[in-house]
Amino acid sequence: MTDITPKGVIERYRHAKDRRGVWESHWQFSCWNENDPNREKILAVGRDNRNFQSCLRIARRALAGTLKDPTGGATHYHAKDMTPPWAKDRKPSAEIGRHRFYNDIE
C-alpha cells in the first residue's frame, strides 16, 4: 500500500529524483542523450497524453505485481548488436525484440 502521508510523499519524490538522475545520465538510456531524435518527443509529452496515461496504468500494475515479467526479473539489458563488458560470458534471462535481458548482474 502506498504511504500517502507527507513523509511518504516526500520519500517517493526523493527516490524518483534520484532515479531520474540515473535515467538522464549520459548513455544510460539513449532517448535522453541530447543528440537522440526521440528526446524532444519525450520532453513534449504532457501528463494528459492518452499514451502516457496508459503507460502509467501499466507501470502501476507492474509495480503491484499483477503483470507477468517477461524478462525473468532482469535488472540490466542491452541491444543485441552490442556486448557491454558486464554482459560478457553471461546468459540472458530473456531476449525480446532487439534486446537481451539479464537477471544475474550485481
Image (tube, helix red, strand yellow):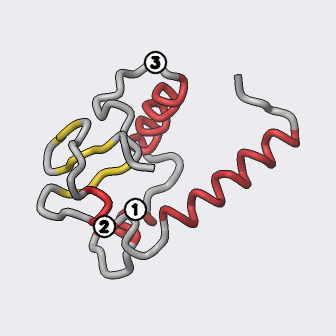
Q: Residues within 10 Å of mark 2 (few under 14, many from 20)?
A: some
The residue that disc 2 covers is 38
Q: Is residue 12 above or below residue 93?
A: below
Give the numbered dot on residue 23.
Answer: none
Describe the element under mark 1 as helix, strand or loop: helix
Name the quadrant containing residue 80.
Answer: bottom left
Residue 86 % position (x, y): 32, 60
The amino acid type, in three-letter code, at marker 2 is Asn
**Given contact means CB atoms under 8 Å apart, are the residues at marks 3 and 1 in contact?**
no
Mark 3 or 2, nearer chain start: 2
Instruction: Name the residue carrying label 1.
Output: 42
Q: CA distance from mark 3 to mark 2?
A: 30 Å
- Residue at the extreme right: 6
Residue 52 is left or right of residue 91, and the answer is right
Image position, residue 83 (x, y; %):
19, 63
The circle on residue 66 is 3
* Amino acid type assigned to the residue bearing label 3 in the image: Thr
- Badge 1 crowding class, 10 Å Cα cut-off, few under 14, some 14 to 19, many 20 or more, is few
| Tags 1 and 2 touching, CB below 8 Å | yes
Q: Position of residue 30 (x, y in %)?
A: 33, 68
Q: Residue at x 37, y 64 (%)?
A: 29
Q: Nearer the viewer, mark 3 or mark 1?
A: 3
Q: Secondary structure at mark 3?
A: loop
- Pick the residue in front: 55 or 89: 89
Q: In the image, residue 71 lies at what x, y percent?
A: 30, 34
